[in-house]
Structure formats: structure tokens, C-alpha cells
Image: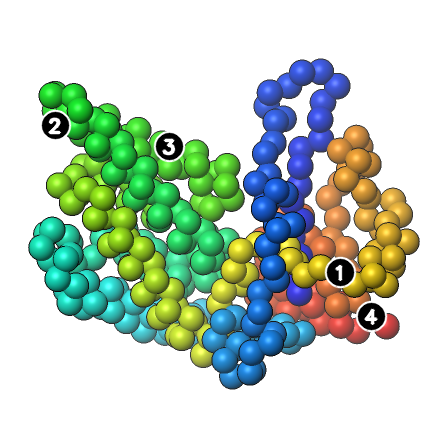
Amino acid sequence: MVHQPQHVPPPSKGFDLSRWHFDVDAYLNPYLPAPPWRRLPRPVSHFFGYRGDQPPKAVGNLVIAFWALIGAFCGVLVIAEVSLQVPSFQAHHAPIIVASFGATAVLEFSAIDSPFAQPRNMIVGQLAASVIGVAIGKLFALNPHAHALPQVGGALACAITVAFMAITNTTHPPAGATALLAVTEAFELGWYLVPVVLLGCALILCVALLINNIQRRFPVYWWTPHSLARPKLEDAESIRREKVPSVKPTESEDSVTDAPEQIIIRRGEVLMPDNLWISAEEREVLERVSQRIQ
């Protein structure tokens, strides 16, 4: 499994606001359990993206284009058809599909290795965008001249959503469009936009799990690329012994020195900088090398 540890900018000798860094995962991950997919039957866990120690097979762009075509068509169609069957949505004149899900379909079925396409980014990003967009629209509605300023409300909702996603590691580009639409196009829908968006996220994720796991692997991770498994006692001892500067600098050493970033290959794992994204073919090569280490 390829782990991509977070890189925290080293502190400067002086007071430098540009080097401030907040990692929400450092506070959340210790309390989150590891995904349970390995305990499920392999035919079931396969469609949750679990492959065990087997790296995903590389495929050509023609295969990617074919499944992206099938997936985008099915994903958008399922959202629209199901939304039409929800009476409360129709009673509130909800759109058959929020337009930003067209952009989400591109990520969920074509760029499935992108961190922007992973379930956490998609669900949290879209949910936050809908809540922020509706809240900003409601606040602007308190002003009698609010309807004359949709451009200001839309810009503010989009900006707050972008900042929120950056801080929480949940960046999902289509969510910016959702926040904008919540103020400029779906204002009359109000808070009903939130369940509309959540239903769309759930449906497109289900379609993506089915279609993307036929010849590819999705998701790459559910919450974080880092392992959430608690190390065993003997594993913790071995990791502690291995923490020497020549192999992997400690966090304190990494924060003080400006050593170049490294790719570290160990038995069964590959450690990479978080700002280095590789293709499926490159990932397969690295994981094969890690499996050959005795």
C-alpha cells in the first residue's frame, strides 16, 4: 500500500505567518477505526476498493475512456431518475440533478486516482458547499436589497467553501459550483438543497463503486491515504528501531532541516511525499519492488 505522509512546512527562525499549517487529520485520524473491508468476503470487498497486497493493474486510456463513458452516463441518469421519484423534491421544485454533479462525474469516473475524486472529498466537499451556500443565501435574504446582489452572495459562498475544503483536506472542485448555484440559481429551494445534494452524492458513489471496480480500483482510499490501522506491539518496536536519519527523518528533524524529500521503499509499503502524485503504472512498479524486499 502506498502511504503519502503529510508534509508540514518547517518552522522558520522568526515569526512567519506564511508557514502556519493546520492538519485536521492529525486530530481526527487517531480516533478513526481502520476500514473493515478486509474482513468482508473478497468478492464484496473488491467493490469497496480493497485489493489486499495486490497492486491495481495498469490500464490504457481507451479502457479508461470506455468505463468513464459508461459510468458518467449511468451516474447522471441514476441521480436524475431517482430524484424524479422523490415527492418532496418535486413539491419544492428541486432540479432533477444539481448541475455541479456533471463535473463530479468527470472526477468519479475518469480521474478516479485523483484525491479530489475520493469519497471523503466528494461527500464532505459537496455537503459543506450546499450548507454554506444556503446559509449565505439566507443571510443575504435578511437584507431587503439582497436580490439585487446575487453576485456578491455567490462569490462569498464559493470563496468560503474553497477555504473550508482547503483547511479540512476535502477539496472537491465541483463543490465550488454547488455553493455558487445555491445562492444564484437554487435560492428558492432553501435547505432542501442539502438532502438533494446528499442523495446525489450517495447515488453517484454507489454507481462509481460498481463500475470503477470492474477493471480498475476505486476508491484509492476512503478517508485518508495514511494507514489507520493500529500497529502491533512488535511492529511498533521495529518501526521505532528503524527511525534513523539515513532511512526516514523524524518529524522534529524534518522540521529543522531542509533535507530533500524522499521516496522510501520498505517491505510491503512505499512512503512518498504528499505533493508527489504518480500514475497507476508507476504505483504498480513501486509496490512490486516493495513486495520483493525480504
In this view of the protein, can residue 121 be seen by the observer? yes
Tell us which disc is closer to us: 1 or 4: 1
Residue 69 seen: no
Q: Earlier in the sequence, mark 3 or mark 4?
A: 3
The amino acid pointed to by label 4 is: Ile
Q: Where residue 280 sits: x, y (%)?
A: 57, 66
With respect to residue 74, does 97 lie above or below? Answer: above
Sequence-first disc among 3 and 1:
3
User: Badge 3 local density, few (<14 within 10 Å), some, or many (20+)?
Assistant: some
Kindly identify which residue carries mark 1.
231
* Nearer the camera: disc 2 or disc 1: 1
Circles 4 and 2, Cβ within 8 Å, touching? The answer is no
Q: Amino acid at mark 3?
A: Ile
Mark earlier in primary sequence (4, 2): 2
Disc number placed over residue 24 in the picture, else none: none
Distance from the alpha carbon under mark 4 to that under mark 2 = 65 Å
In the rendered image, the quadrant that contains the N terminus is bottom right
Q: Position of residue 67 (x, y in %)?
A: 38, 73
Circle 3 residue: 160
